[in-house]
Amino acid sequence: MMRVLVKEKIAEAGIDVLRQDFEVDFLPEMSREEMLKEIGGYDGLIVRSGTDVNAEVIQAATNMRVIGRAGVGVDNIDVEAASKRGIMVINAPQSNIISAAEQTMALLMALCRDLPDAVNSLRDKKWDRKRFEGVELYHKVMGIIGLGRIGSLVAQRCAAFGMHVVAYDPYISDERAKKQGVELLSNLDDVLNRADFISVHLPKTNETYHLLSDEEFARMKDGVRLLNVARGGVIDEEALARALDSGKVAGAALDVFENEPAVDNPLIGHSGVIATPHLGASTQEAQDRAGVMIAEQVRAALNGEFVANVVNLPVPAEVDEDVKAFMPLAEKLGLLLTHLVEGHVDEIEVEYLGGLASYETGVLTVAVLKGFFEKIVSEPVNYINASIFAKERGLTVRETKSESTRDYVNLIMTRGKRDGDQVAVGGTLVGLTNSERFVHVYEYDIDLGPSQYMAFFRYADIPGMIGKIGTILGDNDINIAHMQVGRRKIGGEAVMGLNVDTPIPEAVMDAIRRTPKVKDSKFITLW
């Protein structure tokens, strides 16, 4: 009989699920030394956030087939080391969405009525009713930044209080927002200008880090109130402190912080802040739900059944090797498309040209979607849920094929379409080593290998433009590793693609955007 180690507390119902098929040891008090000694005898492991499943543990887990995290994040699991050993890593991403939404509402109400200070005042035997005059939610504007699963639940609950809900999420369609009774705004500034309350529901990425800083606070209404039950780091905490001190922000309710545990964070002691220690998922129901969900998934994995929430889902074994070789490139094309479209698209079309068109390419289309959603959603994206995210956002996904091709033996073209407009990216593999190449960006043919840091510029094709852009980068110590230019006709428009050695700061990108005849500028971090 296979053995499962439950290293941290989960719902008893979850343990009962496992005991139907396996020998289960529930050992939350097991020391790390004991775990390293005994882990080799287990086929499955379930943890929460308190157990560090690092490379040392995984190396010792000689029989391990699956590691389950009873919750959303897998930061305490070395996923790369597990993948190298062929160990499946599973999480329970939907276990806490209701709890996180309700925590947002709890903080919202506490913020409106200054409940923590009122409670403490009364405990000090003071009856100071005038001091704690609050504000109503009724007829106020709630601005939601990020209309994913949790943001949507918050929107529903705010509407029930009679609030008018506006939102900014460039990857959600107008139609989907309308079905939720939400007014979708086209840019972040519109939300900042109109909202009486702002609630953040975004993953923390390079693009969302310090999304709300001094400039954004300046655009908000005077007396705005701010909530973050999503990820620390999305709000610039020093900028928030300045906005609170100036009175621009009347109050903030924070459940997450850039560095946790945040016991020494100065915001916690600020009179305008209500702070809680990352309690978004801390309800009995969410914890029980996570335990049962992860137990069911681990049971399925060990029994060789379908598992939905695999963080490191491998390529299906039945995929042809010729197709499998294109999967990393397909993911990168999806990620590149995300950066270039900068928002929702109604349709993604993936076209396969050349010999590749004769194969079953469905897994490549899913790989494109996996890359496309990687920086958009807060949950890990895999080859199962990528299609689910597309469906949830009302995104039509289409495949086309042709064995005829003009320039390349094989070519993948990926197009994001909306309202008759489209952005296209294309890629192929070349040479005996199957080197990845981006060969089409926007409407132009180029030839550039993917790299961690890339930039693309569209500009008028006139003398001196390459020099102007290169000079700005050079003056700011940005080294260009490779450069390619594509154009259709002399004197028209051109696109320049760059591989650079280091990230390009936003101030440098702004300087390039201000250069006359530069139409568009994008800096991209691919991985």
Image (cartoon, rainbow, N blue to C red):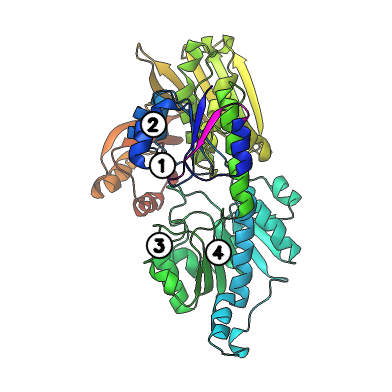
Residue position marked by numbered label 2 in the rendering: 38
> Which one is earlier in the sequence, the residue at label 4 or at label 2?
2
- SS category of the residue bearing label 4: strand
Asked if marks 2 and 3 touch (Cβ < 8 Å), the reply is no
Q: Which amino acid does label 3 sit on?
A: Ala
Compared with 146, 420 (above or below) is above
Q: Quadrant of the C terminus?
A: top left
Q: Mark 3 points at which residue?
A: 262
Residue for point 56% across, 75% down: 116
Secondary element under disc 3, as helix, strand or loop, is loop
The residue labelled by disc 1 is: 30
For residue 48, side relative to residue 397 (left or right): left
Q: Position of residue 426 (x, y in %)?
A: 49, 25
Which residue type does callout 1 highlight? Answer: Met
Magenta range: 20-29
* N-terminal label among 3 and 4: 4
Query: CB of mark 3 within 8 Å of CB of mark 4?
Result: no
Asked if the stretch drawn in magenta spans residue 22, the answer is yes
